[in-house]
Image (cartoon, helix red, strand yellow):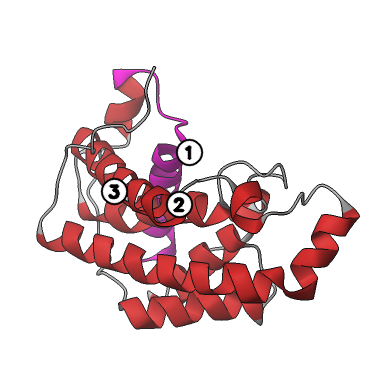
Amino acid sequence: MNRRNFMRASTVGLAVATGVLATSEETSAAKEDSVAEAFKTPDPEALAEAVHRHFITGKKTCGEAMLLGCIEVLDIESSLIPDIALGMGGGIGLQGRTCGIVTGAAMVTGVVVGSREEEYKKRKMRVFSVCGKFLQWYENERGTLLCRKISELDLTTPEGRDKLKAGVKVNRCGPIIRTAARMLAEILRDDEQNPSYVPPASTLTL
């Protein structure tokens, strides 16, 4: 996939992943151009290793590491990455909300799964399906989606950030991001073989 086509695919996919969707049929239809090349599923172990390396050795945030690991394994180049994921760190702006592993995975899904479908409406629902599956797996695995509960740190404070650097990132978050990257690859592989356009039922109650 050339740079122009990747930028188109990533723009559409990231909009889907973050919920910033087109509000008119005309705008959506304009994005329904042909996909030049669909990305194959990254190898689970290769993705896990790349993500973990960027997170620990490269000292990137979890959201950046998820995205960087994926584009490295898939041999993608973009000037937007990793900065486009920088704000996801620490539960979005260090606020302890949705873990950057989840938001980073959603961005990866927009890029990879978004490249596999030409029609915008189908592309949107296929990305939603994969994102929903990963989010539900992660919540079941960790018992929460909240960075503050997973890390047990308040990263808005110097003390919290010091504790993260002192060992929490390596000892607690490191194994989590490696496992999550491996599972993301498995879910992406399942989408490649058995695409679904139906997102899993929400576990939230009104």
For the point 54% across and 77% down, the residue is 52
Does residue 197 appear to the left or right of 152 in the view shown?
Answer: left
Disc 2 packing (10 Å; few <14; some 14–19; many ≥20): many
For the point 39% across and 46% down, the residue is 13
Callout 3, which amino acid? Lys
Does residue 19 appear to the left or right of 83 in the view shown?
Answer: left
Quadrant (top left/top right/bottom left/bottom right) for the N terminus: bottom left
Majority secondary structure of the magenta segment?
A: helix
Residue 37, given in percent of the width and then of the height, sits at 24, 63
Residue at the extreme right of the image, as rendered: 158
State yes or no: residue 126 in magenta: no
Quadrant (top left/top right/bottom left/bottom right) for the C terminus: top left
Disc nearer the start of the sequence (3/1): 1
Residue 164, given in percent of the width and then of the height, sits at 75, 65
| Residue range (magenta) | 1-25
Which residue is labeled 1 in the image? 18
For the point 42% across and 48% down, the residue is 139
The part of the image, by quadrant, that contains residue 14 is: top left
Residue 112, disc: none
Disc nearer the start of the sequence (1/2): 1
Disc 1 packing (10 Å; few <14; some 14–19; many ≥20): few
Report how far apart the C-alphas of labels 1 and 2 lie in the structure. 8 Å
Does residue 66 appear to the left or right of 130 in the view shown?
Answer: right
Which residue is labeled 3 in the image? 133
State yes or no: residue 10 in magenta: yes
Q: Nearer the viewer, residue 81 or 129?
A: 129
Residue 159: in sight, yes or no? yes
Asked if the residues shown at circle 1 and circle 2 are in contact, with their CB atoms under 8 angstroms apart, the answer is yes
In this rendering, the answer to whether 38 lies above or below 103 is below
Report how far apart the C-alphas of labels 3 and 1 lie in the structure. 16 Å
Q: Secondary structure at mark 3?
A: helix
Callout 1, which amino acid? Thr
